[in-house]
Structures are given as C-alpha cells and as structure tokens.
Amino acid sequence: MRSQSSPLLLDLYQLTMAHAYFELGMNDTAVFETFVRRLPRSRGFLVAAGLEQALDYLEGLQFSGADLELLHGLGTFPNSFLDHLSKVRFTGRVDAMPEGTPFFADEPIVRVTAPLLEAQLIESRLLNILHFQTLIASKAVRCALVAGGRRLVDFGMRRAHEADAGLHAARAAYLAGFHATATVEAGLRFGIPLSGTMAHSFIEAHDSEKEAFRHFARIRPAGTTLLIDTYDSERAAQRVVELAHELKGDGKTIDAVRIDSGDLAVQAIAVRRILDAGGCQNIRIIFSGGLDESQIEGFVQTGVPVDAFGVGTSLDVSMDAPALDMAYKLEEYAGRPRRKRSPGKLTWPGAKQVFRTRGTRGETLEDRIALHDEQLPGVPLLAPVLSNGQRTGSPPKLRDIREYCLREVQALPPGLRKLEHDSGGVSVQVSNEVRALAAQADRAIQ
Amino acid sequence: MRSQSSPLLLDLYQLTMAHAYFELGMNDTAVFETFVRRLPRSRGFLVAAGLEQALDYLEGLQFSGADLELLHGLGTFPNSFLDHLSKVRFTGRVDAMPEGTPFFADEPIVRVTAPLLEAQLIESRLLNILHFQTLIASKAVRCALVAGGRRLVDFGMRRAHEADAGLHAARAAYLAGFHATATVEAGLRFGIPLSGTMAHSFIEAHDSEKEAFRHFARIRPAGTTLLIDTYDSERAAQRVVELAHELKGDGKTIDAVRIDSGDLAVQAIAVRRILDAGGCQNIRIIFSGGLDESQIEGFVQTGVPVDAFGVGTSLDVSMDAPALDMAYKLEEYAGRPRRKRSPGKLTWPGAKQVFRTRGTRGETLEDRIALHDEQLPGVPLLAPVLSNGQRTGSPPKLRDIREYCLREVQALPPGLRKLEHDSGGVSVQVSNEVRALAAQADRAIQ
C-alpha cells in the first residue's frame, strides 16, 4: 500500500538545499542515520516502528506535474531545477532495525545511503513517519508490560493528532502488545482485531437504560458489551443480570460490561459481586476513561476484578512524552566522515551498525555502536530493507512483528521492564573505530 | 478542498450504534455539542480552530462500494444496514464559533443538529479534526503573546504526529499569530508564507563552512539565511561579514543568520556585535532548537538581540499539554433534553448558545452559557455554518481568521494573556434556563 501523502510535505530548506546541490553538481553518495539523542526520562528503552510506512513513502516518492507547477509558483526555483526534480525518485539503499526492536539513545535505527540530493529531500517526512510510530510503540509497550496479560484496546483515535496519527497509533500499539483497536479503518487496513461497544449517547437517546441494553443486546451479534456507568453502575449491573437471564435461549449473550468514569476499582468490586451473585460469572469487566500505564499497573497489582482496558488519549498522544528527540543526520559524504559539533548535539560519524550481545538464555546483555563494516560479537541489528529504491523482500506480517517485539522486550533485563526503570540494564558502548573516525572528522574541519 | 480521509476512520461503536438505531427506526433529530470539559492547567483560554476541515469532512461524508465491501467482511452487519449506510450523507445543521475565537471550559464550540444516526457516525472524526487544530492554535497563541511582534515560524513538521498533523499544525499556528511555516505543502495549500534556511548537513557536506555559505548565497535568490552554529557561531559570523562584503554588487544578499544550539543568548550578543562591527546591521538573527513560549518570553524580556524564532516540536505536539479534554455529547434527542451523569463527567443538556458581553472598549467581560433560543445581552458566539449538509457561505480567508483571532485575543483581560495566567479574567456563567433543563432531564431518567 502506497502512502497517499504529497512529496510537497517537506521543509522548504530541503528544496533550497536540493537546488544548491543540483547547481553545484554535488551528487556523491551520502549516508544519513536516524537515531534518538536522549530518551525521555520515563523511558528505559524505545521500540522501533513505522518502517513499513517509511518504505512506502520512499518507494512512492515522485513529484507530479501539478506539484512542480505549485513549486514554480513560488518564484524562487529555476526551471532547470524543477525539470530535474520531476525525474527524482528515491534510488538509494536503506538498512534498518526490524520494527519492534527495543533500542537505546544514539543507536541508528534507520540508515539511508543515497545520492545527496535524494537523501536530503526525504529528511522531514521520513522523520515524521518513524518518529510517530516509534513514539506510540514505546508508550504502548509500557501498558503491555504491566497489564498482566489482560486485554488492551486502543480507544484513542478521537484525540490522536488527526487522521493518519489515529490510524498509525493503532498499528504501533498493536505491534507493541495491544490486542485490538476501536478504529475501524486501522482494523481493516492492518488486520488488527476490532473492538467496540456503545457510547453513553446510546443510553441517553433511550428513555430507559434497561430498554437501551435490551435493544442493543438483541440487535447486535452474540457477545456484546454494555456500558454501565451512564447513571449508576451498580443498578446497571443488576439490569445486566436480569437481561442476561432474559436472553437465554435467544442465541444472544452479553460478553462484557464497561465502566468509564468515577472510582473504577470500587465500582468493579461491587459490579463483580452483583454479576457473580446473579450467575453471570462469565461476563467480563472492561475499564476505560483516561487510563494510563500507571493506573493499569495499580489495578493489576491490587487485584481489582478487571479483565480488559480501553486506553485512549494517553496512548495516542503519548501523553507523558509526546515527542522524541529523534534526528536524521549526515554521517558520511563522498566517502568521508561528517559530524555535527554544535553544543549538545555532537554526533558519531560514519555508516554504523549496532551489535547486540545476548546471554545463554537469549537475554540482552550489551549493545555496541560500531562502524557498519566492523566484525564484532553479537547480532547486527540493522539489515538491508531497500536497495536501488525498492524493497528487498515482502513486508513482514504485522502479527509476526508483534511476536518478535514481545520476545525482544521479554529479553530485556527486568529492571528495564518496570515503569520506574533502573538506570542500568543494557550497556551501550561506542566502538573504538567510531571514536577514531570522529577524531579524524574533527581534524578535517576547516 | 475535500478531506481525503476515509469514512471508515471512525470507532467501531459508532457503527454498532448506527446499526441499532437503524433497526429500531430511531432517527429523530439529535443535538450534539463539542466542548472542552477542563482546560489544561497552563491554559487560561483556548482558541477554536479546525472548523473548515471539519466542514470539509461533513460535506464529503459518503461510504463507497469498497468501504461497504470491507464492512461486509467483518461479518457482523446485515446487508440491509449496509445498504442504508451507502445512502447516508450528512444532512444536518452545524452552528459553530468562528475559528480563532478564544473560549473557555464547558462552552460549546460546535453544535450539530442532525438525524441521530448521522450525528453519531461523525463523532470521533469530528473530534479528531477539531481537537487537533484547537490544541495547536491554543499553544501557538502563547508564543504570539510573548514574542513582542518578532517573527514566528513553524518548524515542527518532522515531529508532528504524522502528515495531517504537520500540515494542520502550520495552519492552526498561523491563524493564532505565527507568521510563516517551513512546511511547503502547508504554505501552498493554505497560502501561508513559507520560510526556510539550510540544515547543518549542507555545511557538513562541504569541506569548509565558508565555501558552503558562499555556494548557498550565490545560488539562492537575494535575502538568504545562513545557519551559523554547525561548528563555532562567532567564527561563522565573521565569515558571514566577509561574504556579505564579497557579495556586494552581485545582487545577492544575506538576510539573516540562524543559531540552533548551545546558549543562544550568549551567542546572539557576540554575533550581533560581530555583524554590527562588520557593517552588517541589517542582517537579522533567528533562533531555533527546541524553543517554547517560556524561552521566547525570556529572550524578549531580557533584551537579547533576536529578530525571529523558529518553533518546532513544542508547538507541533503542544508539548506541555498534548491533548485537550474535548468531548462530543448528546444534549437533546427527539425534542427532549439528555444528560450524562457519570461521576466527573456531568454535562449541561439542551441546544446551547454562548453570549459574550463586551465592555465599552470592546474588552471581553463575561460569557453566559444559555439555551440557544434565549435572548440575553452580548454577542452570540455560535452561528450557523452548515445547513442541510451544505456550507451556508464561502469559507473565510485564513488571513481574515488570523486578524479576527488576534483582535479577540487582545480583547481578553491582561491577566489571561500572560503565560502564568490569573485565575480570574472572564467570568463564565450558566443561565438559569440551562440549570432548570438539567433538573428536568434528571427527573426524566428511569
């Protein structure tokens, strides 16, 4: 599936630089790498995501006649450059960590090797794609780590930052351990299980709550969910019990009740008691309403009778850390290492690889950031995914990415898998060859 | 311009409820309202935005054959309902505050009056659109309030939450007082002035900084901007002075230098001195690099020699408050008031209007949340914008929205226009008629 976004979704400076490179004939091979400079304080690791959408973008990159017409209208680009732009495609190579890989600060997750102009043109949109899903996967995994196997559903589309954020938040959450999404298009497009109940408005549009429950359960397929906190969740739970008995023999069933406001734990205990006393031990309890991973952990640790969580806003905007310090930096041009020395933004030059060392039980011990052609112990995390502008293989299945992610996250040290993570965990080292190259790059600067 | 988003970008429960409404023949008129329950702690007011994109969505709502095919595949909706869905358009009416209006908690900004099924179907996507631009406009206005007239440019697309967010963040920022954006597509689509310089990679791809500056200034049109912090901003400023003299008579000029890292204030003072001593008093200084409104206020208040700010991540994700507690709630169905009574989520029933009272100099004094047919002093803020599913007039120009917004913001009490706002300012009252209707709605609940 190709990205629908326009090639004009870039920063103006990418075009002004491309124009200059064109005029100067500077079209040697450049190596750019994407990495996160510093992790948000509350994150012990991040989860790489968004690569498939990034590759869609790269494979589809092309300026249409209409795009060039618009650029012409800006009046600052000569026709010779716009003609050149009409022929530009992404012809380079991409090496990347598989989606779902846990990673740390300074580690390249995507390396782009391409003619300078192409590699520069894609900067902002590539970051825009990789940043968002990585952000959300890194938030979602925290919910998965504390939910104790309970079902997690993405409810956040309405407060995600517009359409494609809503869509891709569902994808990123699923690959990092969520079980389903409420967002229909995400379910259909990515094969994510869909989950949905009813809103308070359904109850309110009826003159009685019981009638609303009955209508919904009779019309919808067996296994429905009823929302019980519009007025009084305990009274509603009684009605659910009565309705469950009424439905017997009709082929209709109530699978769950959802509580969305107030003191969820207190209500759940009372509701569980009412359901059980009424012979409805099979009806599950779902929580929603502004939940985050800390609250989920609290409910699970204190044994609150809850079976599933709908997580919305805090997931879809990564509420406590809504952005990552992710960058896309030039590491090499025309065979020579390049390096930014701006205060606080020093980068490691050269085309790099990350070698991950594992213990005897597969547990992650150490990462080493090295030059791409070094031979070091451990598994190299970046592998070729695009060559001559085309994918090197078919995209992995989202379900396989999800399984890989869960496995890799379980291989992290226990201290990193806690919400309040330890500072230690996996040691990340920079190889001597990278350090030597940095010194060489610094000497070359005039 | 029609929204390109799919009608399937909705929550599953909107379809399950629509199915039930269809089977039950519940298709009386419903009134839903969009409002923000509580403002983020750091916001004294919000700025309404996103209405034009919301109306695009409503005017264009339609399920294609392919959409219905996909829904059919879910196996839980009968053909009779899917047939009905194929004929659904939004045929209702919308009343709204104009974009750019400052507003407060509990005030409806958009009121939808439509057959229940239609009004319910649009819930999540309507919120998704209105929430985001309102969020960003409400953040951007804070920068505008403290920048002392200095130029503000949106640099945030790369860390915005995907494509639509990058695009619409530029729009929302502009209407709330920004002057330009770096995002090319936003500039072209919405007529926002574009601004762009060069990246560090441009300098690094050259073997010397001076050569990079010279190349860029000679190739690009007069009035270029050079990025001076790749290695050492003071040495770079010297090079800019030399180059400015070298360019004299060539029709090329340097308009500005940009500093993106390190201690911006210290560097700016030194750079300003170097530029002035070299006869380059006209060259402006631009700051960027993780700026937010507090830093901008600090630079302006301490008299740092800076002429413009590029604001990125903190703007495009509204870093300190990345989501608003915005809701879309049923207020009336079949002519009767409806109300949610869930703990902490009580709503005011009925179709409502907001009357804003102004003082003799146009300053905002008080808002009164009233029923839509009450006659109260002040200006009614909501006006019809869509009737029978079609716009009632042509969309306002973005520049006019911007002027209206700046005027309305200036009319707010001074205490609300500070970053650390006063609690008082504008008093927001709920009319007695609304309170009486709430009591009536409560009595009706069984």
Image (tube, coloured by chain):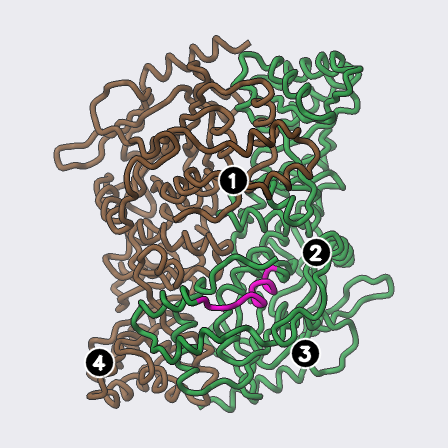
Chain colours: A brown, B green
In front of the other: A402 or B274: A402
Where residue A113 sits: x, y (%)?
40, 26
Q: Label 4 to label 1, Cα distance in Å?
A: 50 Å
Q: What residue type is labelled 3?
A: Ala
Judged left or right of residue A268, residue B266 is right
Vertical relation: B371 (above or below) A3: below
Judged left or right of residue B144, residue A136 is left
Residue B279 at least partly seen: yes
Secondary element at tag 2 = helix
Q: Give the mark nearer the N terminus: 1 vs 2.
A: 1
Residue picked out by circle 3: B370
In front of the other: A253 or B18: B18
Residue numbers of the magenta segment? B53-64
Residue B297 at least partly seen: no
Secondary element at tag 3 = strand
Q: Which chain carries label 1?
A: B
Judged left or right of residue B311, residue A34 is left
Residue picked out by circle 2: B416
Asked if the magenta segment contains residue B285, the reply would be: no
Quarter of the rendering containing residue A193: bottom left
Asked if the magenta segment contains residue B63, the reply would be: yes
Q: Which chain carries label 3?
A: B
Name the mark nearer the viewer: 1 or 2.
1
- Are both tags, 3 and 1, on one chain? yes
Res A280 label: 4
- Are both tags, 4 and 1, on one chain? no
Is the residue under label 1 in contact with that under label 3 (CB below 8 Å)?
no
Q: Label 4 to label 3, Cα distance in Å?
A: 45 Å
- Are both tags, 4 and 2, on one chain? no
Residue picked out by circle 1: B158
